[in-house]
Structures are given as C-alpha cells and as structure tokens.
Amino acid sequence: MHMNYLTSLLCTLFLIGCGGGGGSSAEVIVPIESPPPPPATTPPPPPPATPTFDIEYNSAPDATIYDAVSKLEIPTCTLSRIQHTMIVDLNNDNHKDILMFVMCGHLDHPNQGINVVHDDPTPNTMLALISDGRGSYEVNNIDTFGSDHVQLGGEKGGVAGFFTMLEDTTSGIGLPHITYMVSRDDHQRKRSEDWTNHFSQQGVFTADYNNTYNLVDIGEPLWAQGVAALPNMNYEWDLLFGYWDNDYTTENMPLAYRNSGQDWFDVSDEYNNDTDKHKMSQHAYLLTFDINDHRTFGEVKSVTSTHAIGSVGHGFSIYDITQGQVTETLVYDTCDELGCIEWGDPEADKWCGRKEIVEIDGVHYFGGLAWDHFELWWPTPDSDPLLLAFAAMNRLPDGEQYDANKEYDCNTQFEGGTVRVLFELQGNSLVMLDNPFPENYINGGGVHKQTIDLNGDGYMDYWSSGGSAQDGEPQIYINDKEGNLVYHQRGQLPTLPQQDFCNEDGCIVATEESFLGDLNSDGIVDLIQYHAGSYIPNLPEHVQGGDLSVFENKSGQISIWYGE
C-alpha cells in the first residue's frame, strides 16, 4: 500500500516601519527568497547483523560416562546402539536426568537377512543416567525402572520412537508419563503376509509412589506408526496409536487408552463412534500442539494442548481439541493445492508405483508426499505461530530438472531427503510462505527436530540432529529477527574424538550423535554427545570373521558440555 501526503505552506509577511521628525513614511520590505535547502539524505540502513550462536563450551567435557550400556550387564545387549535421547527429571529431585533408548544385539544373534521372512525378536532397553545435582551422572536403571533390562515391545522387542513426556495431572506423584510407539519395522526381515512379524506390544511408563517407573501394556501387539497424546474432558490424557493392519487400504479400529492416575483403560469405542475422532485415529502420524504454552521437544507436554495435526495420503489434517472435543478444522491436500503429476505404474507393487510429482518453489519432487513431522515456529516473540511442515521426498540428483517428455520408473536415480515448508493459517486455509531456511531441501531431516531459543535473544531458532545423512552433527539455524533461519557452522561446538573398533578383518567407526538441551536449568543450552555404539543386531559383513569379541560392550562414551 502506498500513501501520498499533501503538504501546503501559506506564508504572509507584513513588516511596517515608522519614522520621526517632520514627516512620516511607510516602507514595505519584501523578503528575499533563499534557495531551498538541499534535500536531506537518509543514510542507508546498516546491513543486518549476522545472527550468532554465542554459547561457549570447555575444550574438555564437563562429564563423561564410558561404555554406559555395558554397565547394565544385559547378555542380549553386548552389541548396542543408542537411538534416542530425552531430558527429564526421573526421580523428583528437581535435577534433570538423561533417558536414552538403546537397540541391542549380541554376537550369537542369527543373521537371517532382509530377504527372509522370520519372527526373530529385536531386543532393546532403556538407559537412565541419573544426575547427582553437581554436574555428574551415573547409570541407574534399578532405582528408575526396578530392573537393569527394560525392554519395550514385549518379548519381541522392537524399534521405538515418538517418545513424549506427559504432565501428570491427577496422581499427585508429579513424575511425567513417558509414552512411545514401537514396532519391528527394523529393515532386518522380509514382511510376512499377515505383517505380524512387524508387530510389537505397545505400552506407557507411569511412575508409582516410590518414584519407580512401571511399564504398562496397551492393547494387543500391532505394527505401530505413531502415538499422540490428547487432553480429555477430565483434564487427563488419551493415548491414540496410529498403525497399519494387514490391509492399509481399509480403515483400522482405533486404539485409544485413557489414564486415571496411574491406571490406563480402553476408550477405543469412543474414538470409533465419534466421526472426527475416528478420522483422527486413521492418521499414521499424529502430533499435538499447544499454541498458548509452547514447550520444546524433550520438555514435559502440558495437558492444555489445543491442536492436533495428522498426516495421511497426499497431505494432512488439522484438528481443534478442546475439553475432549475433537473437530477437524482444515484439510491440506498437496495435489489440490500445488498440483501433482502422476508417474510410474499405479499397479506396481513398489514404492514408486503409487506416487506423484509435486512442484515446490520451482523444483519437482518425486515420491510419497509424506508429511511426517510438524513444528510450531514464532518468527518474532510477539508474532502468531507459523507451521513448519516436513515431508520426505526425492528429487533428481545434481540439479537435474524434471522433463515432462521423459519417462521415469523405479530404476530412476533419485536423491532422498526432506522438504521443509512454512505455512500461515489464514481463515480456514493454509498459505505457503517464503521458506525461512537457506534452502527448503536437506539431505536427511534428522531424528530430533526442535524449535527453541538457542542463543538467549528471545527469538525462536531451530536445530535437528540424528540420522545417517547428518553424520551426527547437529544442524543449527539461528533466527535473524527478520523471518529467516540462518545456518550456523559448527564453529565452537566441541566434538568427540573418532572411536574405531577393529579386528583383523576390518573396523567399525562409531557414529557420533548430538543432542541440545538445558540440563542445569540456567537458560543456556548444553550439549550431549555420544558414540552411538557398535552396529546392531549384527555386525557388518566386512568385519565378519576372526575375533568378534572386540566389538562387545562398546557402547561408546557419553560426554556432556555445559554451555556458558
């Protein structure tokens, strides 16, 4: 919008002079016009300051735990890999502890291969690092869980994710519930016809009055894809699991459980009989948010959550959740909004046969249009929240452009990664905004994604970590206060020395992983880094042979740096 300002200047000057003596006279003096002053020059605005990540860390770790998993002395976990990290007070002492999920294996575990249909278990355990309040940590599963070996997924185990800590509103214990999903979708087996060899037992951790966490089973084993926590009319939690059955083209019966204090009971019928709740239950991936009390990933989620976002098909749906009532308020269909180009054989029993091509910011992306993660982001402290949406897609490598005259099939070479898109809610629709990242496509999106103020300037930044494409290094983006997220080079972030495990046939390089969070509650982000561990459930082929014992109980060190 342009505004024109009209300015009028009316000046009248009268100057009368009187003389004495024998006569009088009057003289009109006409002022001499001075040339107009030169127009004021406005100095150019200074270039925007480059946002910085001003946290300093010591050259050496402030705390280190060596071979943490081996301290549990679990026979089926002599080969291990740390998969997830959380920060939470586990014993009500007002000190933040570290909770990790660990995949397990051992040298005698049979390696049947990914092309064999088998029902072997996928062992795992939780790992609790308890703070002493003075900056150090000790491995202590006994006091935390009552046992060294805490396996998720029942006797079959599995790979767990979507860990979320939920506010305890009714028991009076004060320790959060710990929720997750788990399945044996571990890329170590061929799927059986009924899919049951991917099933695992779902559950939730709830603390008792001894500050010990008990694992509560939820429903029957299934192939879970996600789990979301929704506040209900009793100011308590409902857990809604997303899953696949033996035919993903049909609607699944909802799996929903409600807590009352320390107990959990089945409310699946309620979700099945309510139209919007039933539709919500069909999302494989569902996340809940509170636009009024935003808490970053890893913090205890408030029971005041206001919205849920679920991914399905070509897009996603947004729901309002108020006092246990669920209302679908918006559906975003990628193909309707952006247009899709069908490609491949729709009858082909391969990933590429059922997918489309979509254009975003002039780039064509192939693949599932799978919106698999969402974060709220505030560009400024007083702005309305915007929606950061992440989608797993593929593009042609080396900047190659899509050619409408060319045929693409399952053998086409693609580059896999994550597309990041920013949306604004305008009325009952979502409007795609300029991408705040330096580029909207990244090779690997990271296991941990978090919007958080990293440098203490009051503006919300972003970081992610985990995933093979990131090589363990956190991806840090700092808010420039003008609606952009500027990539921050690793700079002063410390790193762990490379750790190799070798026998006469070869070596394994222990992958470095990182996690950022405020461990000591001083408002400054701290850094947790660790060697994820030796490969599980079986060692890679290039080291098979000779003395394999050198790979046992090498979970790698966990190091902690406190930010200043």
Image (cartoon, rainbow, N blue to C red):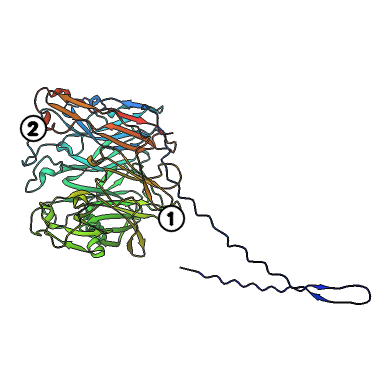
Q: Is residue 108 left or right of residue 282?
A: left
Q: Is residue 459 above or below residue 561?
A: below
Amino acid type, label 2: Pro
Q: Which label belongs to residue 383? A: 1
Tell me where residue 402 appears, x and y as whole percent.
18, 58
Give the residue drawn at x 30%, y 58%: 318
Q: Is residue 207 visible?
A: no
Tell me where residue 519 appears, x and y as whole percent.
38, 35
Neighbor class of circle 1 (other Cα within 10 Å; few <14, some 14-19, many 20+) is few
Q: Nearer the viewer, mark 1 or mark 2?
A: 1
Label 2 sits on a secondary structure element that is loop
Q: Nearer the viewer, residue 533 or 145?
A: 533
- Tally of numbered tags: 2
Q: Is residue 51 above or below residue 278?
A: above
Give the residue drawn at x 8%, y 34%: 111
- Residue 453, by quadrant, is top left
Q: Quadrant of the C terminus?
A: top left
Q: Which label belongs to residue 138? A: none
Q: Is residue 248 left or right of residue 3?
A: left
- Residue 346, by quadrant, is bottom left
Amino acid type, label 1: Ser
Tag 1–tag 2 contact (CB < 8 Å): no
Q: Is residue 117 visible?
A: yes
Q: Which residue is mark 2?
A: 110
Tell me where residue 270 appears, x and y as whole percent.
25, 56
- Precedes in sequence: disc 1 or disc 2: 2
Q: Nearer the viewer, residue 130 or 265?
A: 130
Q: Nearer the viewer, residue 291 or 560?
A: 560
- Residue 38, by quadrant, is bottom right
Label 1 sits on a secondary structure element that is loop
